[in-house]
Amino acid sequence: MEGLSFFVGVIGNIVSVLVFLSPIGTFWRVIKHRSTEEFESLPYICTLLNSSLWTYYGITKPGEILVATVNGFGIVVEAVYVTLFLIYAPKGMRTAILVGILDVGLLAVAIAVTQLAMNRDVRIDAIGFMGAALNIIMYASPLAAMKTVVTTKSVEYMPFFLSFTLFLNGGIWAFYAVLVHDLFLGRSGGLIRRSSNFNTQRINHIYIDPHNSHKALMKLHYADLSDASSLRRWLDTILPDEVYNLAAQSHVAVSFEIPDYTADVVATGALRLLEAVSSHISATGRSHIKYYQAGSSEMFGSSLSALCEETR
C-alpha cells in the first residue's frame, strides 16, 4: 500500500505541473492575435491565488517543502498568464480589479490574520482549510466560460486540456487521500536519544529510514529525557497531536544494577516529558495533546509479537 501511495503521489505531482502548463497553447494564441478574445481570466486568477496559499502552507508547515516548491512553480506560471490578460484583455480594468481583490487583497488578509491572530498549530489548519476551499473554487472556475460556450455553441473558449488536467489532477489527489487516510498531507515525527549507534530495533516494524527510502512516513529527531530543554524545543518544532513515551530501561536485570539511572529515565524522565508537554500547551495556546505512557515492554508485553492499540 505504501508503494502504491508513493507512486500515486509522484503521478499527482507530475499532473499538477501539467495543469499549470496546459494553457500554453491558449496563451500562444493570445500573443499571436494580441487579444484574449472571449477567454475567461477567472480560472487563472483563482489558480494563482490557490498556488500562493499552498506555497504559504508549505512554508509554514514543517516537512512540506515539496508542496511549497511545486506551487511556487505554479505562482510563476500563473503570474505570466494573468499578466498576459492584463496586457491583451479588452476588459483589462475588470481583470485588474479581480487580480487586486483575489491575489493581493485576499492573500494579504489571509497572511496577516494567520500570522497575527493565530498560533502556529491553528495557523497551519486554517491555511489548509482555506487552500481546500480555494481548490473547490479553482476546479469550478472554468464554468465561468459556460455562458460563452452556450451562446456560441462552441467549446472553443473553454480549453479542453485545462479542463481535462484539472479533472485528472483532482481524481488522482482524491485517490491519494484515500490511500493515506488523511485529507491533510503530513508526516509523523518521533524523538530518539542521541547515541553512537542508530538504535531503532523496537520500532523497526513501522520505521523506514528516510535516507534509504522515499516511503518513510516517520521522521526521528534527537532529544533526551534527561534534558528538559531538548524536549520542549522539539515539541515546539514538531507540534505533535499525540505523544507516545516509549523510552525506558527495559532490561529487568540491568534496571536493578543501575537503579538511579532507571528511576531517572522511567520516572523522572516521564515527568520531564509531561511538564514539557504542559508548558508547550500553555505557551502555544493549543487545546490539548494526547499523552501515552508506553515505555516498558515488561509492563505492556512484547512490543512485536502482541501489538496493542490505545483503545484496548
Image: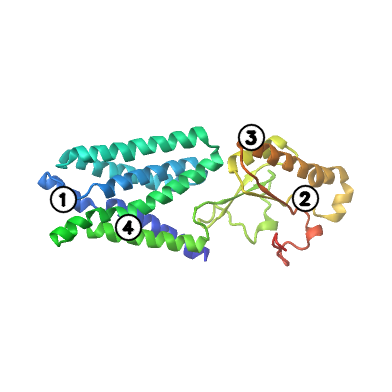
Quarter placement of the C terminus: bottom right
* SS class, disc 4: helix
Distance CA(mark 3)–CA(mark 2): 28 Å
Q: Report x, y in % for residue 187.
A: 55, 51
* Mark closer to the chain start, 1 or 2: 1
Say which amino acid is labelled 4: Leu
Distance CA(mark 4)–CA(mark 2): 51 Å
Q: Residue at x 17, y 49 (%)?
A: 28
Say which amino acid is labelled 3: Ala
4 vs 1, front mark:
1
Is 20 placed above or below 177 here?
above
Q: Residues within 10 Å of mark 4 (few under 14, many from 20)?
A: many
Say which amino acid is labelled 2: Ala
State the residue in front, 255 or 53: 53
Is 114 placed above or below 303 here?
above
Q: Residue at x 80, y 54 (%)?
A: 250
* SS class, disc 3: helix
Mark 2 = which residue? 248
* Mark closer to the chain start, 4 or 2: 4
Q: Report x, y in % for residue 5.
A: 48, 62
Mark 1 = which residue? 38
Q: Residues within 10 Å of mark 3 (few under 14, many from 20)?
A: few
* SS class, disc 2: loop
**Colouring mode (rainbow / by chain / secondary structure / one colour):** rainbow
Q: Residue at x 37, y 45 (%)?
A: 51
* Mark closer to the chain start, 4 or 1: 1
1 vs 2, front mark:
1
Mark 4 = which residue? 166
Say which amino acid is labelled 1: Glu
Q: Where residue 283 is drawn, which disc sits there?
A: 3
Mark 3–mark 2 contact, CB under 8 Å? no
